Amino acid sequence: MTIPNHLAIIPDGNRRWARKNKLPVFYGHQKGFQALKKIIRKGFKMGIKIITIWGFSTENWQRSKQEVSHLMRLFKKIVDNYLKEALKKQIRLVHLGRKDRLDKILIEKITQAENQTKKFDKNFLCCALDYGGQDEIIRAINKLISTNIKSITKETFNQFLDTRDLPYPYPDLIIRTSGEQRLSGFLTWQSGYAELIFVKKYLPDFTEKDLENCLIEYSKRKRRFGQ
């Protein structure tokens, strides 16, 4: 089986899963994150080097204050819990996205997690919080404007993106759960040649076996990169 170096996941469908099962939306998010934890472990065990998860988009601020507050509390717990596992398994934690609008305590926890794991270089877990592909590109351009760089190449531009510290910044495979068939601005610059798999299952129902099936499907594809 061909294993991607970089797997990116758009974990969609928590709210619809909750409504389908006549449960509170918040419970759907919790079940979704539980499913993600198993998927992440399975992915690293299978040999994937980088896993990127989109946790909260720049557009998600439009949701109710109650839901956003719950998600922020949930993210804090996840950072605390997963940091212990990351240190034990030598996984580097990387935040993709803006740091100026997230909860102050959450940002402190993220920064601490990044600093404590920055020496690891075998496996990377990237969490995209307050992330949008267009927003990332605009932020990169604004950083470039403040420099004296006169000529911009692809390699130069990569150094100003959120993925600049990754050995494989371009995802080989992007999986989206819930049946939606779009990227919604996820890794806009980096996803140009990524293989895409859209799974009908909502995130809470997505299992390690489903991940294996996605990797089998990925192995069947021939990547030509325009050649």
Image (tube, rainbow, N blue to C red):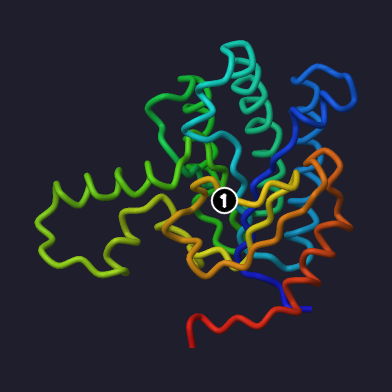
**Left or right of 135 on screen, residue 197:** right
Taking the spot 62% from the left edge, 25% from the top edge, the residue there is 76
Residue position marked by numbered label 1 in the rendering: 183
Tell whether 101 sits left or right of 39: left
**Does 97 appear above or below 121?**
above
Q: For this rendering, which residue is in front, 134 or 215? A: 134
| Local SS, label 1 | loop
Which is nearer the eye, 28 or 38?
28
Q: Is residue 40 above or below residue 72?
A: below
Quarter of image, res 90: bottom right
- Image spot of residue 21 (x, y percent): 90, 25
Q: Position of residue 211 (x, y in %)?
A: 80, 58
Quadrant of the image containing the N terminus: bottom right
Disc 1 residue type (three-letter):
Leu
Give the x, y percent position of residue 5.
62, 69
Residue at image point 70% right, 40% down: 12
Q: Residue at x 65, y 83 (%)?
A: 222
| Quarter of the view holding residue 3 | bottom right
Looking at the rendered structure, the number of numbered marks drawn on it comes to: 1
Residue at 77% across, 68% down: 215
Q: Position of residue 204 (x, y in %)?
A: 82, 38
- Identify the residue at the far top of this view: 66
Question: Badge 1, how many Cα within 10 Å: few under 14, some, many 20+?
Answer: some
